[in-house]
Image (spheres, coloured by chain):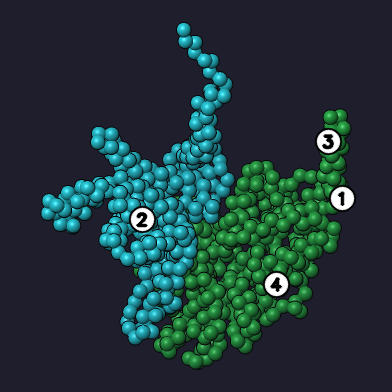
Chain colours: A green, B cyan
Amino acid sequence: MKTFARALCGAVSMIAVTAAAPALAEPKAEVLHYWTSGGEAKAVQALQEAFAARGGEWVDAPVAGGGGDAQAAVLRARVLAGDPPAAVQIKGPNIQEWAEAGALGDLTAVATAQDWDKVLPEAIQNIVKYEGKYVAVPVNVHRVDWIWANPEVLAKVGAEVPTTWEEFNETADKLQAAGIIPLAHGGQPWQDATVFETVVLGIGGTDFYRKALVELDMDALGSDTMVAVFDQMRKMRGYVDPDFPGRDWNLATAMVMRGEAAMQIMGDWAKGEFAAAGKVPGVDYVCASTPSDNGYLLNSDSFAMFNVSGDDNVEGQAVLAELILGTEFQETFNLFKGSIPARTDVPRAEFDDCAIKSMDDMVAAAEGGTLLGSMAHEIAQAGAVRGAFIDVATAHFNSDMSSQDAVDQLVKAIKLAQ
Amino acid sequence: MLTRPPVKFIDRIARALPQIVVAPGFAAILYFVYGFIIWTGYISLTKSKMLPNYTLIGTRPYERLFQMDRWSVAIENLFIFGFLFVFVSVVVGCLLAVLLDQKIRAEGFIRTIYLYPMAISFIITGTAWKWIMNPSLGLEKVIRDWGWESFRFGWTVDNNLAIYALVMAAVWQASGFAMALFLSALRSVDQDIIKAASLDGASPWRIYLRIILPSMRPVFMSAMVILSHLAIKSFDLVVALTGGGPGYASTLPANFMYEMTFRRNEIAVGAASAMVMLATVAAIMVPYLYSELRGKKHV
């Protein structure tokens, strides 16, 4: 019996030693993310390798599915249980909500050392800062207000990519007369909302977009400009084929590739589809910003850093934050993902024409104050308010609701959601 | 004189065994079902947004809930879907059972075919029917390719018909199950009564209508209970078949609840919608169960 007790004692102390050992040694970070497929998975792999190269232990916690819904449920449970992961892929106002709940750590030390204020556009800083302190690290920037066009199809009616909404309508009418679907679109609420926000930006202009979709100014939301926006949306509805409801966005992209449809309005993740099919930008497809007064709707993924305890975790978090915003990772990751780096000083040589246009436009928009967060993609709005916008946009697009009714419903829904 | 043998400990345990065995399950149900119903009820009266928050704000979440267009669409859909699904499944199931009961050849084989859909999950049913009903891939395209150019079958892409597309897929899945229930009930009807009735000159039609079907009343109840709970908890079918669309025209309360709670940071409104769903179920089921169970005692 005695020997047994001694053996047990020994075993316990050994476990204690092995468990305590890493606490002194390597930095460690558990990363909760939903990048589990294709280029995104490769991109995460790149980060993982860079982290390991710095001697860190990466604990991968991928939660697939639902565009982050499944992950959100896991995150909530973890935080409520008092055991948050070190870094979590969250974006937009959700960062602010978690910061307000007191769950996020402070990255000021890394940010100052790496001079983040200099390399990040202010619009992006505002997303990842809470009360002036960095609480999250931006990974990339996706532009939302793009038109992806098939130049061959446009040439059939002697048209180019439209630069105003009047031109867009004229071109679309001509295409329709020629028996071509003008706009490839997938009727899912978020896609309807994506088109909606580019129309708000184009018809109303950047100031109107800011007032209505960012600041939620009731006068702007209920204005005649908004009625005009819904009028344009009704026209757009006429330009999509009858089978659009429920279609996935990549199938709509394929319609443009195959020449069944002329254009698609979608963020630059659509570029990945073209690239995967071996299409060359400028030859097989054209990327152009949707008509607006130099507006730029950005969608930025980021990692929020949660309050963690233990030196290894804190150290790991700091290393991770530094790596994510490092020039090297920003370049590798965004080449995989099809987006552009969040920081503006990354070498451009490897990027394609669409990405370079996106970078130029972002810098110009940041200087001109027309760099805006996307509503449909959870940067300008999140949760209930975003849901209310999407509800009205999709209800209008998928029924014969009048523009005035849609505006009335929008005002009511936004008030209700606030 | 008889002395009572002392009750052995082991016998006591044996006597209490049923209670002991049931107790953990009972406790778990009490906590996980009723406990969380109460918790949800409480949360539905708080200002919970992204995380549960225990500050009470009264019925405000319910007021907001009933002002939401999405919710009124969802509730209306539940009534359309629930009623049609249960009714059509029962009628079709009953009809199939009666037909199969005619001592036909290869009954076992046919029965398996009809029952098979029940073995498939709703997510697969939904996906398969999504393809069948997709105008540019499925039935519509096939029939058009055969030459009927004007044929239109776009239920899933029509605002007003999408909910009926859900009914169709759900009926396909569940009516075989209803059939199996009714078939076993048909077989258990006392053959002597039927013989007596036919000797009295009653037509087969009359025998079914007046003798066999009325005697199957308890089975109707089971079918109703099972089918209506399937209807109310329908979630995956909507996700797979229509995605709640076009727009949110075919969304059901369960989808609404998920959307609010997990996507829109509106836990209180989500909880309120769950409570309303519970109340709806109770409003339908309690009187029905009550009348059925009470009726039985008098028989």
Amino acid type at image mark 2: Ala
Nearer to the camera, B230 or A43: B230
Q: Which callout, 1 or 3, points to the residue nearer the camera?
A: 3
Do residues under tags 3 and 2 come within 8 Å of each other at their CB atoms?
no
Q: Residues within 10 Å of mark 4 (few under 14, many from 20)?
A: some
Amino acid type at image mark 3: Leu
Q: Are marks 2 and 4 on the same chain?
A: no
What residue lies at 56% left-to-right and 58% top-to-bottom? A381
Nearer to the camera, B278 or B214: B214
Find numbered disc 4 in the image and state the secondary structure of the residue it sits on: helix
Q: Which callout, 4 or 3, points to the residue nearer the camera?
A: 3
Write down the chain letter for disc 4.
A
| Residue tagged 4 | A336
Write down the chain letter for disc 3.
A
Q: Which callout, 1 or 4, points to the residue nearer the camera?
A: 1
| Residue tagged 2 | B180
Do residues under tags 1 and 2 come within 8 Å of each other at their CB atoms?
no
Find numbered disc 2 in the image and state the secondary structure of the residue it sits on: helix
Q: Which callout, 3 or 2, points to the residue nearer the camera?
A: 2
Q: Which mark is residue A8?
A: 3
